[in-house]
């Protein structure tokens, strides 16, 4: 077999593999052209065997694309095992607060404990109960109008309103009398005026409101030493929970979900969870360790230790 024949044979099997992958991903030739970087005319001529340019260069580019998507789908398969939400003791605690706020139509505050599961529990709760809206704040929400717009979007109002008052009216109209729960995550980004705007929505609708955020949201709501000034807001908060580091039970629950056994692995994971990233950091390490294992092989202490070191961790 000469070089040209060998090239032709390789091209036939590459074309077959590409067609199979495209079928699996339900993708067109033009999408393949975009993703692989091979221009559409070149690609179509190459596929039909009529390309008169450098066939090897086209085949190399397509081979690279194929390898990268296959590698990605292997990794995704390994990552599919990542537990979305586990009923850890902290998560159950948060669920209880949210349930209370919704049922009692009260205002609640869950703060502190970076990476212990506030956001993922809020999402779980939203998926599990009716009329739960999750509005996530950010540093861009530094005006009342921006904050209300974010809340409006969360409750399903997609049309922009011409003024903050119209946005507020639209929100109230949408959620009043629904026995719902508005969860405001990352509430530490809100200035006091926006927190007051949320309070007004709460007063006007009777739905539960749960504010979540880091430690500073508490100071913001209590107003530090100027408590009298903030009494209107603070006195409405019926239930507040301060979270700290993940508990041993939290880590045990996650490790059971990841099917991690062995005393040494457990001790290492507990130590990792006590670092600043808490369960977020631990999950990152476990995700990386799971990608290091061969198919069907379970994660060992060495995998976890290597992943932790690769992510720059030191204990
Ligand atoms: N109950 C849980 N079940 C499964 N994974 C969890 C749980 N709690 C935390 N995690 C993992 O930890 C990560 C961080 O959790 P989450 O984002 O909910 O923390 P947070 O308390 O909102 O942190 P922050 O204060 O930084 O916003 C999650 O993405 C998830 O991987
Ligand atoms: Mg969060």
Image (spheres, rainbow, N blue to C red):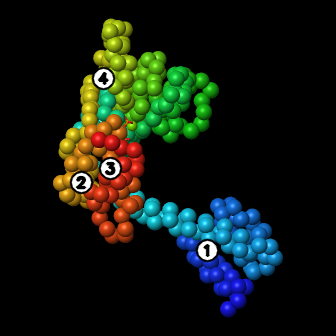
Q: Earlier in the sequence, mark 2 or mark 1?
A: 1
Which residue is farthest right?
52
Q: Is residue 45 above or below residue 183?
A: below
In front: label 2 or label 1: 2
Q: Earlier in the sequence, mark 4 or mark 1?
A: 1
Q: Secondary structure at mark 3?
A: loop
Which residue is farthest left?
263
In front: label 4 or label 3: 3
Number of labels in the image equals 4
Q: Earlier in the sequence, mark 3 or mark 1?
A: 1
Q: Is residue 295 above or below residue 275?
A: below
Q: Quadrant of the C terminus?
A: top left
Q: 23 and 61: which one is in front?
A: 61
Q: Are marks 4 and 3 in contact (CB under 8 Å)?
A: no
In front: label 3 or label 2: 2
Residue that appears at 32% across and 9% down: 225
Q: Which residue is mark 3?
A: 85
Q: Which residue is mark 1?
A: 18
Q: Between marks 2 and 1, how big is the CA–CA gap?
A: 41 Å
Disc 3 within 8 angstroms of ligand 1 (CB): yes
Q: Between marks 3 and 2, how big is the CA–CA gap?
A: 21 Å
Residue that appears at 35% across and 18% down: 219
Q: Between marks 4 and 2, how big is the CA–CA gap?
A: 41 Å
Q: Which residue is mark 4?
A: 237
Q: Between marks 4 and 1, how big is the CA–CA gap?
A: 59 Å
Q: Quadrant of the N terminus?
A: bottom right
Q: Quadrant of ligand 2?
A: top left
Q: Which residue is mark 2?
A: 265
């Amino acid at each position: 077999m000469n070089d040209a024949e060998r090239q032709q044979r390789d091209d036939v099997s590459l074309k077959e593999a590409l067609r199979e992958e495209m079928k699996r991903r339900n993708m067109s030739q033009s999408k393949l052209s975009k993703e692989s970087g091979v221009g559409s005319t070149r690609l179509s001529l190459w596929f039909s065997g009529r390309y008169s340019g450098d066939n090897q260069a086209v085949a190399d580019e397509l081979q690279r694309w194929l390898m990268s998507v296959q590698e990605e789908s292997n990794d995704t398969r390994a990552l599919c095992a990542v537990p979305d939400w586990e009923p850890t003791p902290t998560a159950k605690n948060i669920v209880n607060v949210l349930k209370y706020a919704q049922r009692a139509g009260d205002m609640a505050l869950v703060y502190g404990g970076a990476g212990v599961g506030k956001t993922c529990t809020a999402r779980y709760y939203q998926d599990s109960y009716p009329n739960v809206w999750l509005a996530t704040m950010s540093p861009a929400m530094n005006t009342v109008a921006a904050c209300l717009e974010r809340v409006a979007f969360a409750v399903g109002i997609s049309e922009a309103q011409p003024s903050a008052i119209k946005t507020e009216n639209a929100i109230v109209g949408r959620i009043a009398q629904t026995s719902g729960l508005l969860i405001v995550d990352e509430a530490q980004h809100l200035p006091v005026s926006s927190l007051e705007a949320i309070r007004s929505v709460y007063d006007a609708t009777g739905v539960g409101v749960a504010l979540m955020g880091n430690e500073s949201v508490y100071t913001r709501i209590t107003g530090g030493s100027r408590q009298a000034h903030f009494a209107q807001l603070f006195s409405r908060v019926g239930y507040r929970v301060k979270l700290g580091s993940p508990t041993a039970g939290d880590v045990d629950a996650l490790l059971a979900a990841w099917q991690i056994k062995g005393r040494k692995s457990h001790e290492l994971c507990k130590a990792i969870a006590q670092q600043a990233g808490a369960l977020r950091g631990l999950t990152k390490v476990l995700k990386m360790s799971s990608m290091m294992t061969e198919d069907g092989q379970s994660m060992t202490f060495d995998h976890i230790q290597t992943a932790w070191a690769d992510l720059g961790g030191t204990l």
